[in-house]
Image: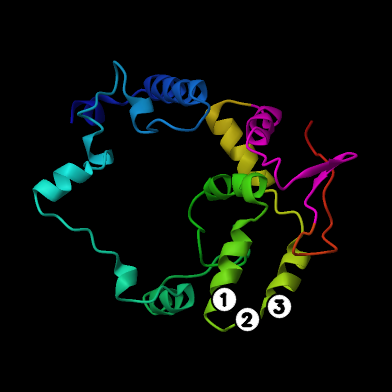
Amino acid sequence: MEFLQSTDSDERRQRIAEAAYLRAEKRGFKDGDPIADWIDADLSAQDLAPYFLPADEELEGRQIKALFLGWYFRWDPQNSFRIASAHGFKARAEGARVGHLNYVNIDDDFIAIHHHPKWHKYGITRTWDTLSIEIRMGRMTREQAIANLRAAGDETPWRDIERFCDYVGITVPEYFEIVEGFRNPKIWTRRGDRWVIDGFLVDDFAWPADSVL
C-alpha cells in the first residue's frame, strides 16, 4: 500500500489526523462514517478498504454469515484472565485503568476517553459495566456493587484526558466543552456549581463541582 510505504513524515501524519478531526467536528462527532473522515488527497478510500465493513447485501450475496463467539462460550473476564495468566499475562500492578478490574483495558492510553462520555449521556461509567458482569456471574451482590461505586466516587480520567488532548492538539477545557454537548438533560439537573442526577443509584454520592468551566 503506497500510503504505508511512504508515510515517514510526522508532519504528514499530523496533517492527515487534523483533517480527519475537523471533518468529524463539522458533523458534531455523530452520524456519518468515522472511517470516511480520514479520506482525502493523502489517504484514499482504497487505502482504508480494510476498515470499511461490507454492506448487508454484499454479505447475503456471497452467503457469508457472521458468528459471535458469545453464542457458544459464555463471556467471563475472570476466566479469560485465568487462561491468559497461565501463559504469562500479568495484571496491572498500579490497579485498574478503567472500571474496577486491573486486567481489563490496560494497554490503551485512551480507553478511558472511549468510556468517559457515557457518564454524561447515561450517568454510568465503565465500572458499572464490569460490576454488572460480576453480579450476573454471581460473584457479587447488588449491594456490594453499589458500595463499590460509592467508594469509587468521581471517575473522571484526568490523566488520559490530558494525554488525549495533547495528542489531538486541543486544551482540556476544549475537551470538556465538547463532552458537555452530550450531557443528557433528561437525567441531569444543574444545582449550584455541579450537575446531579435525582434518584441516583448511590443515594449519598459525592457529586463533584465543575473542575473545568
Q: Which mark, residue 134?
A: 1
Q: Is residue 178 magenta?
A: yes
* Residues at discs 3 and 2 in contact (Cβ within 8 Å): yes
Q: Locate residue 35, reporting x and y percent.
A: 35, 33
Q: Residues within 10 Å of mark 3 (few under 14, many from 20)?
A: few
Q: Earlier in the sequence, mark 3 or mark 1?
A: 1
31 up-or-down from 98: above or below: above
Cα distance between the residues tagged 3 and 2: 6 Å
Quarter residue 98 falls in: bottom right
Quarter of the N terminus within the rendering: top left
Residue 9 point in image, percent of width and height = 36, 22
Which numbered circle lies on residue 140? 2
Residue in front for this viewpoint, 111 or 205: 205
In this view, 42 is above or below 159: above
**What quarter of the picture does the C terminus occupy?**
top right
> Which amino acid, by three-letter code, is at mark 1?
Glu
What type is the residue that disc 3 sits on?
A: Gln
Q: Which mark is residue 92?
A: none
Task: Return the residue found at the far top.
Answer: 41
Q: CA distance from mark 1 to mark 2?
A: 6 Å
Q: Hey, which residue is sitting farthest bottom in the picture?
A: 138
Q: Quadrant of residue 183?
A: top right
Query: Sequence-wise, which precedes: disc 1 or disc 2?
Result: 1
Q: Identify the residue at image location x=63%, y=50%.
A: 122
**Residue 176 at what x, y percent from top left?**
68, 34
The amino acid beneath tag 2 is: Met
1 or 37: which is nearer to us? 37
Establish if 108 lies above or below 199: above
Magenta-drawn segment: 171-198
Distance between the alpha carbons at the discs numbered 3 and 1? 10 Å
Q: Mark 1 touching mark 2, by CB under 8 A?
A: yes
Residue of label 3: 144
